[in-house]
Image: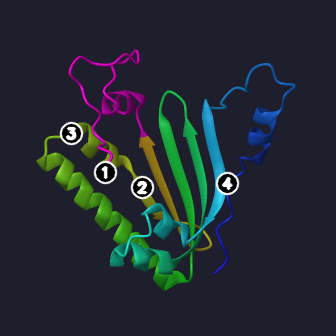
Amino acid sequence: MAPPTPRPHRATATRGSSAANAAPPAGLGEAELYGTLPGSFLVELAGGTKDPMVARIAELVVSSSVRMNVGQDAALSLDVATKDDASSEELEKTLNGGLALLRAQAEQKGERDVATMLDQARVERAEGGGLMLDVAVPGEFLLKSMGCGPDGTPLAGAAPRAKHKP
């Protein structure tokens, strides 16, 4: 199955990287990432894990076109090319099930902001095959997760949610 056609962003990225521009063009975020990754990248991203779920997802995915924009908020979009329609269907069910499980766990822990964010994440079939995954993270949530107030200053006694595990 051919990879889905990536959404047009090259012109914006090219304009944004030009040294001649004193200020970024309107709509260009503070940080952007675009690229295509092989399916095996998922296993590498998970630290080479032997988790059978990660391994199965890597088997279904041919490649992913990634677009990430971080400004006041963060947005991540993936256009995922799969091996065939059956792989797209299996991956769609797996990702939607995983999002539902994470959302339920967040609700159970009283993390309403996380649950709301996960509820708004979307996994849909792409025209021509494959999947599209879209996730948006509000800036306030990012700051709070890092133990910061709305102005970016550290909150008294706040600790980031993410814990580094050596």
Q: Residue drawn at (51%, 48%), measured in percent from left and top?
A: 76
Dot label at residue 122: 2
| Front one among 2 and 42 | 42
Q: Earlier in the sequence, mark 2 or mark 3?
A: 3
Tag count in the figure? 4
**Front: mark 2 or 3:** 3
Please tell me which residue is depicted at 57% across the width and 39% down the height of the picture.
Answer: 69
Category of crowding for the residue at label 4, using alpha-carbon neighbours closer than 10 angstroms: few (below 14), some (14–19), many (at least 20)? few
Residue 73's place in the image compared with 108, above or below, is above
Q: Which residue is mark 1?
A: 165
Residue 48 in the image: state x and y as whole percent: 44, 69
Q: Is residue 151 magenta?
A: yes
Q: Are marks 3 and 4 in contact (CB under 8 Å)?
A: no
Circle 1 SS class: loop
Region of the chain picked out in magenta, as a range: 137-166
Q: Which residue is mark 4?
A: 7
- Of mark 3 and mark 4, the one earlier in the sequence is 4
Residue 8 within the magenta-colored segment of the rendering: no
- The three-letter code of the residue at mark 1 reads Lys
At x 20%, y 21%, the residue is 157
Amino acid on which disc 3 is placed: Arg
Q: Residue furthest right?
A: 20
- Between 98 and 147, the one lying in front of the other is 147
